[in-house]
Amino acid sequence: MPPVDTPAKPAIEDDYGVMEACKQVFHVPSFELESGVSLEAVDVNYKTFGTLNDAKDNVLFVCHALTGNAALDSWWGGLLGDGKPFDTSKYLVVCANVLGSCYGTTGPTSINPRTGKQYGQSFPAVTIRDTVRLHIRLVVEEIGASQVACVVGGSLGGMQTLEWGFLGQALVQKIAVIACGAQHSGWQIAISEVQRQAIYRDPNYNNGDYDSASPPHSGLALARQIAMITYRTHGVYNDKFGRNALDDDPSTFTVQSYLDYQGRKFLSRFDANAYIAIMNMMDTHDIGRGRGGVEAACQLLHALPVLIVGIDSDVIYPITEQAQLHAYLPHSTFRVIQSPHGHDGFLLEQDAVGQAVRSFLG
């Protein structure tokens, strides 16, 4: 069995802090997607912490998850800083927004230079590999790195991290993959699809061509509520809420109030078309595509040191998926984090995640 890390007492916490676009931007005049479509005037919003060394080989690249952004300090801040796992006295730590994001990297809320209007639903389909190829260009062309010491990411960030292993083989020295599998399964696609359907069925969605003054808030809030259930576990919900009702409204369960709050809060920081675009991108995740299948693909990384971390209570990306990666990746280390928090354990169990990453980085 892999080593097991034990967390602190469970609690329902917010998974992200203050979310806003960062000030550092890498501009690419034209970028061709896997589909053959060319995006013009592409921006990549990113944030750096620390200093590039003289050898230019100390970049530590961190990949964010579905609703995250480049402000690593706001959602994995416990891992970042001098002497911490993402040691800014040793590494230049870089985090960049994915394609399709509404936090500064080109996506549905960006202006299409060909029309002068927001892309909206016309934003082209993008893949995990598109985002990673773009981020590799950021690291090489903008930052000027000669090597990447390690790439780290959880959930969607873990999917990107795996692709960094394939697409950046001459560049990347190590990867740390947390709370994801080798491909998006039917289970995970189904969880994404029911959230997309919640948005589609909002009358304000209008096939994605919605008025910015009347966006599909009802559908997006419901999608977020669905996600918040899947991110956690029966035990945490039962311990926190049980069958308790609001003091001032005994007809309303506290869990109903909590989900309503989470849905409404999400509306202030995310766009419906961007949410759909990124979920669609996640569904493209399959390291075996074009590489002879998952097992054959993993053999291509035979010399790359890989840390695989799973959360034992994760309902979305169950521990069996990380175990499969470990079985197929020849040079991998597998750690299991015991947590009541489910998938969100990769964000909330920062001490355990940090310990695993620190040990791996050496």
Image (cartoon, rainbow, N blue to C red):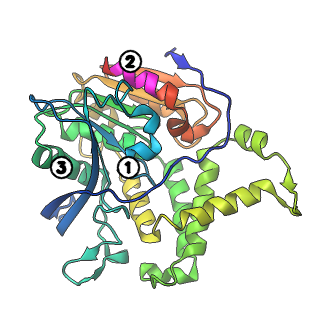
Residue 145 at x, y percent in the picture: 13, 38
Q: Is residue 16 visible?
A: yes
Task: Give the amino acid type for the residue marked by disc 1 in the picture.
Answer: Ala
The residue tagged 3 is: 138
Marks 2 and 3, how far apart at CA: 27 Å
Q: Which of the marked residues, 2 or 3, is nearer the chain's N terminus?
A: 3
Q: Which of the two marks, 3 or 1, is nearer to us in this view?
A: 1
- In depth, the one of 15 and 39 nearer the eye is 15
Task: Report helix, strand or loop for mark 3.
Answer: helix
Q: Is residue 339 located in the magenta-colored stretch of the structure?
A: no
Q: For the image shown, how many numbered marks are present on the structure? A: 3
- In depth, the one of 90 and 2 nearer the eye is 90
Left or right: 98 with respect to 228? left
In the picture, residue 88 is in which quadrant? top left
Looking at the picture, does residue 65 appear above or below residue 117?
A: above
Q: Which of the marked residues, 3 or 1, is nearer the chain's N terminus?
A: 1
Residue 61 at x, y percent in the picture: 28, 38
Say which mark, if any, is on residue 359. Answer: 2
Residue, x 9% and y 29% (percent of image)? 54
Task: Give the amino acid type for the residue marked by disc 2 in the picture.
Answer: Ser
Residue 357 at x, y percent in the picture: 39, 25
Looking at the picture, does residue 251 appear above or below residue 49?
A: below
Q: Which of the marked residues, 2 or 1, is nearer the chain's N terminus?
A: 1
Looking at the picture, does residue 230 appear above or below residue 303?
A: below
Left or right: 124 with respect to 263? left
Q: Which of the two marks, 2 or 1, is nearer to us in this view?
A: 1
The residue tagged 1 is: 71
Left or right: 52 with respect to 248? left
In the picture, residue 259 is in which quadrant? bottom right
**Residues in magenta, as a range:** 354-360
Task: Give the amino acid type for the residue marked by disc 3 in the picture.
Answer: Leu
